[in-house]
Amino acid sequence: MQHNVLILDFGSQYTQLIARRVRELNIFCEIFPYNHFPSDLSSYKAVILGGSPFSVRGEDAPHPDLSQIRGKLPMLAVCYGAQYLSHFSGGEVAASNTREYGRANLSYIKEDEVFFEGVSENSQVWMSHSDSIKALPTNGVKLASTHDVEFAAYKIEGETTYAIQYHPEVFHSTDGSKMLENFLVKIAEVPQNFTPNAFVEEMVAELKEKLQDDKVVLGLSGGVDSTVAAVLLHQAIGKNLYCIFVNNGLLRKNEFQNVLDQYKGMGLNVKGVDSGDRFLSELAGVSDPETKRKIIGRVFIEVFDDESHLIEDVKWLAQGTIYPDVIESVSVKGPSATIKSHHNVGGLPDYMKLKIVEPLRMLFKDEVRRVGASLGIDPELLGRHPFPGPGLSIRILGDITPEKVQILQDVDAVFIDGLKSWGLYDKVWQAGAILLPVNSVGVMGDERTYEKVIALRAVESTDGMTADWVHLPYDFLMKISNDIINKVKGVNRVVYDISSKPPATIEWE
């Protein structure tokens, strides 16, 4: 994509939110670790320095090389970035007497500053730092203050460099998106041309050029990501796309056949491969969540290797990898540590001689849905809840057995069908059931039971990077709990997960 905005990650939990806000302005952006970003910056129109849990005064403070950026490209430094520019460029940063965290209001804004155009005094901003700028860097000019922070925003004369000590990307910064728009559109003059139709046009052209007449094999899951990837590839290479849907034995109830039926009439060449026994035998006795993911990823690749040998001269493996997968799988010194491994990120073993193509690699989930809509994909399919690649394996805490899979499939069917029948499914971003590794005492009739506990999970989100638990109606939860306990043998207790992300993740493993 052209006209990129480069976002440098220093480890802040909000870095991904900066990217989301920039994308909402129809501007394409990319996140890179502060110590590993592209050497060729010729395609970038602006740079944003993110926040960080580190202090610029600490020995372990991240030190970016800004020699190819500062003074050469418009730059916005957020929080840690603002303090970094001050501390190492003639200013002063010191520990605050009190931690400056939470809501604050701008008490002063310098007149006639484009950065604050359309922003009024008293506008609410969100602070999150324990250090504070006590003196501006060389050639620094104060642009805004709050009651407690004198240098809430500044710019550096002679450069197109702006810095702010608050987070414009979070919801609590009332005019945060307006400030980002002022910087990117009015100051940096970045074109707002990142739209679903533009993405489709450019990606199809890119795929045609990259793949030529090569054959491509793609793993379909029935979900939004792989389906949109398949339709994009189909537009680019037609009959040279070979789609394979693998049953790993960890799908939802009846999902294998339902998904195959779903793709009929879409013009895609789809083959179903039932490998459930193979996956479950490999997972027998394994409890560690990372090990489970790695086993599923390995067997998934092996199945594809077997199937690809049946396709003459296939050269590419296509995957529905999306941007949160990429971000969460990157771990470098400083920026966000790896939260979990994604089995569809990170390359192929040497023995598998296929190259990888990932047409959705730079899109967030909501962007994938908008691209799918522009491709004319059925809205019902695009509205499907996300489902993890490792399937129910990471919703069965502890070891996996066919009996546990059967229990969870039955519970999940009751829960999801209930959401649909109550008109709640489309109000939830993702929902699922988790089989806990504990048994609970219960009473059924005159008999004492000692059976499994189920946790239900339903969250609201835009892209999965952050999520809030959904306040499902008590009447609904009561009905679903009764249905699960009465209809699914082996379960005698149901609980509801009311954790948000962060600090929890959406999945339990």
Image (cartoon, grey):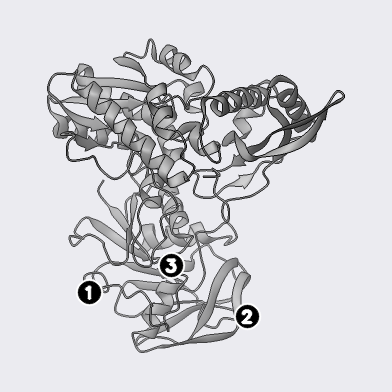
Q: Is residue 41 above or below residue 457?
A: below
- Residue 365 at x, y percent in the picture: 44, 39
Task: Examine the image and state in which quarter residue 355 appears.
Answer: top left
Closest to the observer: 424 or 276? 276
Q: Nearer the viewer, mark 2 or mark 1?
A: 1
Q: Which mark is residue 67?
A: 1
Residue type of the residue flagged with mark 3? Val
Q: Nearer the viewer, mark 3 or mark 2?
A: 2
Closest to the observer: 273 or 344? 273
Q: CA distance from mark 3 to mark 2?
A: 22 Å
Q: Does 77 sit left or right of 503 as displayed?
A: left
Residue at 34% across, 68% down: 75
- Residue 459 at x, y percent in the picture: 61, 41
Q: Is residue 117 above or below residue 352?
A: below
- Residue 160 at x, y percent in the picture: 32, 71
Task: Examine the image and state in which quarter residue 292 appears.
Answer: top left
Q: Secondary structure at mark 2?
A: loop
Residue type of the residue flagged with mark 2? His
Q: Secondary structure at mark 3?
A: helix
Q: Secondary structure at mark 1?
A: loop
Q: Nearer the viewer, mark 3 or mark 1?
A: 1
Q: CA distance from mark 2 to mark 1?
A: 34 Å
Residue under label 2, please give it.
147
Task: Give the mark, 3 or 1, whose residue is nearer the N terminus.
Answer: 1
| Residue 159 in view of the camera | yes
Q: Are marks 3 and 2 in contact (CB under 8 Å)?
A: no
